[in-house]
Image (cartoon, grey):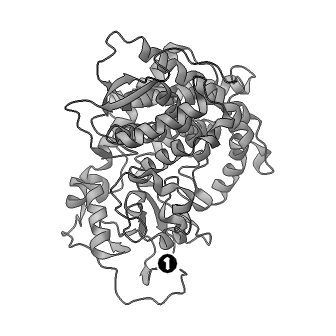
Amino acid sequence: MTRAAAVAPGAPPGPRAYPLVGVFPRARRDPLRFFLESARTYGDVVALPLGTHRVYLVSHPDLVGHVLQETSGLLRKHPSAGRIRPLFGDSLTTVDGDEWRRRRRLMRPAFQPQRLTAAVPAIVEVAGAMLERWRGRAEPDAPLDAFAEMTEVTRAILLRLVFGDVPEHEAREVGQALTLAVEHVNRGLWSPLGWLERFTVTRAPRYARALATLDAFVSRRVAEGRRGGHADGGLLSVLLEARGEERGGALSPAELRDEVKALFVAGHTTTAAGLAWVWHLLSQDPGTRRRLGEEVHAVLATRTPGAEDLSALPHTRMVIEEALRLYPPTWVTARTTADHLDLGGYRIPAGAIVLLSPFVTHRHPLFWDDPERFDPGRFAPERSAGRARFAYFPFGGGPRACIGSALALIEMQIIVAMVAQRYELTAAPGGRVEPEPGITLRPRHGVTLALRPTGGVGPRALDPPA
């Protein structure tokens, strides 16, 4: 698919819009269903006027790939009306152009394979502490909120990997601040005013205090690291040592603060959401749950996993990949056209917003049979061969693909394997799970599950790696 393709006269088709507000009232009620039905009804390029914005939903994998791999400057990162900037600052998530390329080069060493392998023992240790806490629960049979648990464990892992040892009281304070800030931003993302005017959300006092707590923690840790203090060999240490040829060769204190904060915020919120969906889907599928347990016990028996075990757990990896297909935490991403762009036979004007939704494309009927069904076997090599490259893109793609995707998958695979060694998580009576599309696609009411020890390992401490 190239921009030189024949261009049809007129705008792409799309649903009927209201004056001034466009399709916003319909989209706001149920964004996931609205986008999915729009693509299925009107095709691979859909016009969706949202307030004063010209928005186009693009869902065919070839067109998605064209947008993500565009390198001619016709597309840039959409600023999201400033709503997420307090959480992500001027970081890889939000900057563009030469500045983005400079930062990406400086950040890359922190995510080299040897660094990721070195992170495995810390991930295992933090996940093991969670399992020991589950073992010591006062009421072992009481329902457990898997989303809350995954949020806590992934936050603890990212704190350890980025900052090294963080006192428990400080970790708890930062965690509470981050939870409050994310919930505040989520509530504002679908505010009617968000599409009608460009304005920054008024900072409610609790939100402002939460941001101040988060900023103060990150700034303090960066300052200590620059003085040779408490970087503790984590990712912050690597970033402090990063050098390039431009502008003095290193990230400035303000740049480093924003990058570290964005890494912490995005790194654990997306992974926690993905893991929550893994446990929800497994709780509904005894056969897949049983096969997962059999693989984990055959490979690990009673010992904890090491980096060398990950390739021997292919079904575990496929379960995760299928969960990310059905419920991609980064469920939508946006680009803005700097000039007109010919896409799918239509001319997209300059200044328009191009929406890409993994949630929609991952259900494209031309590329996924029975797309709503949970089927990890889709990702077996023999069934994946020949699939369009961008039929599946939970971590984005092209130059701006998520820099931490490999770390997230390692973290998820280790946690899933370690939990499956000890427990089965089954659906609790009366639990209601529904997706909430905010900064991430997360379960609105959590994921309430029953915790049952497995027969193979039982709720006891696991042996260390061989």
Which SS class for mark 1? strand
Q: On the picture, is 220 further left or further right than 106?
A: left
x and y, in percent, of residue 163 in the image: 63, 26
Residue located at (73% from left, 35% from top): 238
The answer to whether residue 336 is above or below residue 100 is: below
The answer to whether residue 408 is above or below residue 354 is: above
Specify few, some or many for label 1: CA neighbours under 10 Å numbering under 14, 14-19, or 20 or more.
some
- Quadrant in which the C terminus is drawn: top right
Pick whichever, 379 or 269, lies toward us: 379
The answer to whether residue 249 is above or below residue 419 is: below
Residue located at (61% from left, 18% from top): 463
x and y, in percent, of residue 309 in the image: 65, 36
Q: On the picture, is 337 further left or further right than 256?
A: left
Please give the residue where the numbered disc 1 appears in the rendered image: 341
x and y, in percent, of residue 315 in the image: 52, 45
x and y, in percent, of residue 176 in the image: 41, 24
The part of the image, by quadrant, that contains residue 409 is top right
Residue located at (47% from left, 57% from top): 378
Pick whichever, 224 or 360, lies toward us: 360
The answer to whether residue 248 is above or below residue 371 is: above
Check the image and name the residue furthest to the right.
245
Q: Which amino acid type corresponds to the residue marked 1 in the rendered image?
A: Leu
